Structure formats: structure tokens, C-alpha cells
Image (cartoon, rainbow, N blue to C red):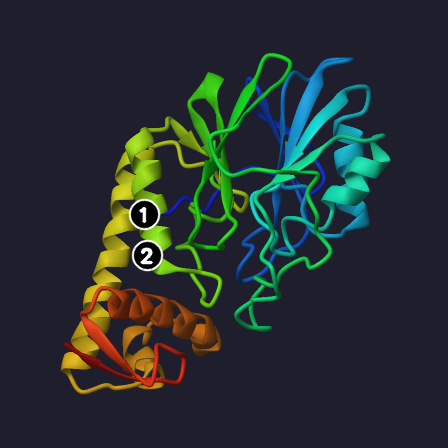
Amino acid sequence: MIPFVREFEFEYGRADRVSPRIRRVVANNPGPFTFTGTGTYIIGRDAPGAGVAVIDPGPPDEAHLQALLNAVDGQTVTHVLVTHTHRDHAPLARPFVEAVGGAPILAAKPPARTIHASGSLDEEEDETFAPDAILTGGEQIRGDGWTLEAMATPGHASNHMAFILTEENALFPGDHIMGWSTTVVAPPDGDMTDYMASLDAVIARDFSTLWPTHGAPIREPVPFLAAYRAHRLEREAQVLARLAAGDRTIAEMVPTLYAAVDSRLWPAASLSVWAHLKALVRVGRVAADPEATLQAIYRAL
């Protein structure tokens, strides 16, 4: 069982000091894929004139924009970092930068085309998002008493970038890891092979704390990440078991695999099963006819 962390203290619009170098402001955009809402992180000292960085400004919400402006009042925003271009993370970046008088927006290269999986998910791209500088991973952004390192973590999104706060051995994993739920990996942009490789890379870094964009921090990452990884491998085994039992389509598998889940979430579950099947086809364990699509016919090899 994954030791989910679903309880944490917050108030919409309030800037909470959560560590010596981190403040968090939660946007009022709760939902089935955003939990309590988007958590925007402010990195740096809460002191007049201090230089700070902001991670994931969030959705286009005027109240959240004002809350962020209040939080950084009297300080200098030196960088705005975006983990990925989904609409609950990226749209407020440009309005926020314009309101504070300018700062570079840094992120991985946005997808070349609109590739969101489904209108039923909050996973659609902010098609207008354009960073000022492109990150590929490994870059270090230095500020007033803090250092952030970009860490490429594709999987949830092809352009997903996490950020390491070196001084606290902490990771801002965006949506790659969430404390309240497993992460949606939704093709065509989401990729399970990439996701598992990124998860292994995060595990190998042995972080002290994870600060997801949605929900509470994960303060015991080792057992949490081990369970997170085991869950994905178990789901893969369950997909193979359904093929062995005679299921041939994703639509046949989902009601059994997700019997305990609200059926309104089955469309999202179907995308997760699709991601697993695409990965299994890639390594030659499953065949798809005619190819690995959401509607394909599958069989185990």
C-alpha cells in the first residue's frame, strides 16, 4: 500500500512558510486531478529586497495572482520556473511576470503540437505558454541563498521538469510524484517507459523531502517511492493477467482492474492502462492490432 499523505494545513491565498527557504500559496482550483488545488512555491528569504524564485505560478486565476503578488511584495522575483505546460501549472506565469516587472520564465520545451489526451482530464496544454529560456536538465539557477537544479522527469508529460533545492536536498516534482494519489500517465504525451525511468532517477537521488505541486509534502520519500514504484509494477502485472484471462481491449479490462474506483474516473483509468500496454508492446511482451491505440486489440506474447 502506498502511504499517501492527504492531510496538510493550508488556506487558499495564504503564504505559508513550510521550510527555511520555502513558502507555499495554494490556488483555489480543487478537482479530481488537482486535489486541493495548485501549490505555488516561493523559494528564498521572506525579507525586504530578497531575491526569490517562483515555481508553478498556476492557473489563470485573478485571486491567486493577487495572493502571489502579496506574498512577494517588497522582494525581487529573479526567476519563474514551470514544471510542465498543463493548464493548472503554466498559464499564470506570464501575467505574474508582467505584474512583478519582469523575470525570465524557465521550462522545458513545450510540445510541438496539441497532444492532450482527453478533455475529461485537467491535462490539457496551455497552448500559449512560451518560456524565455529552455531547460533540458542539469542547469543550475542560483539566487539569494538558494540553488535550484533542473531535473528532467518526462513521463507524466513529455516536457516535465522537476527542480531540486540543493540546500535542503528537496525536490519539487510537479506532477511526477504526488502525495495524495498516483500520477496520471496519459498517452499520447504521457509515456510509461519514460515515467518509470524518471521515477528510478528520483529514487536514486535519495531526497530528504518532496514538495509536489498538489497536496502535502512527502517527508519520508524512501518507503513512499518504493511503494509508488511497486504499484506501477503491480498494475502492469494485472494488465498482463487480464490478457491471460481473455480480455482483448482496454474497455474490457478497466471494469475489472478498477472495480473499486468511481466509474466516472474510468476514462482516466483507461488512459493509464493504455500507457502500460504501449510500454509492454515496446518491449515485445504484448502485441497490438493494428497498433497500440486506445481502441486496439491486444494479446500477450
Across and down, in percent, residue 270 comes to: 40, 75
Tell me what residue is drawn at x 41 percent, y 30 percent. Answer: 209
Tell me what residue is drawn at x 44 percent, y 27 percent. Answer: 170
Mark 1 falls on what kind of element? helix
* Vertical order, 95 against 275 (above or below): above
**Image label count:** 2
* Vertical order, 192 against 78 (above or below): below
Q: Nearer the viewer, residue 32 or 97?
A: 97
Q: Quadrant of residue 236?
A: bottom left
Tell me what residue is drawn at x 42 percent, y 55 percent. Answer: 183
Mark 1 = which residue?
Answer: 197
Tell me what residue is drawn at x 45 percent, y 32 percent. Answer: 171
Amino acid carrying label 2: it is Thr
Across and down, in percent, residue 90 comes to: 66, 48
Amino acid carrying label 1: it is Ala
* Vertical order, 182 against 70 (above or below): below
Mark 2 = which residue?
Answer: 193
Asked whether residue 2 is in view, the answer is: no
Q: Residues within 10 Å of mark 1 (few under 14, many from 20)?
A: some
Does residue 297 appear to the left or right of 270 in the view shown? left
Q: Quadrant of residue 147?
A: top right
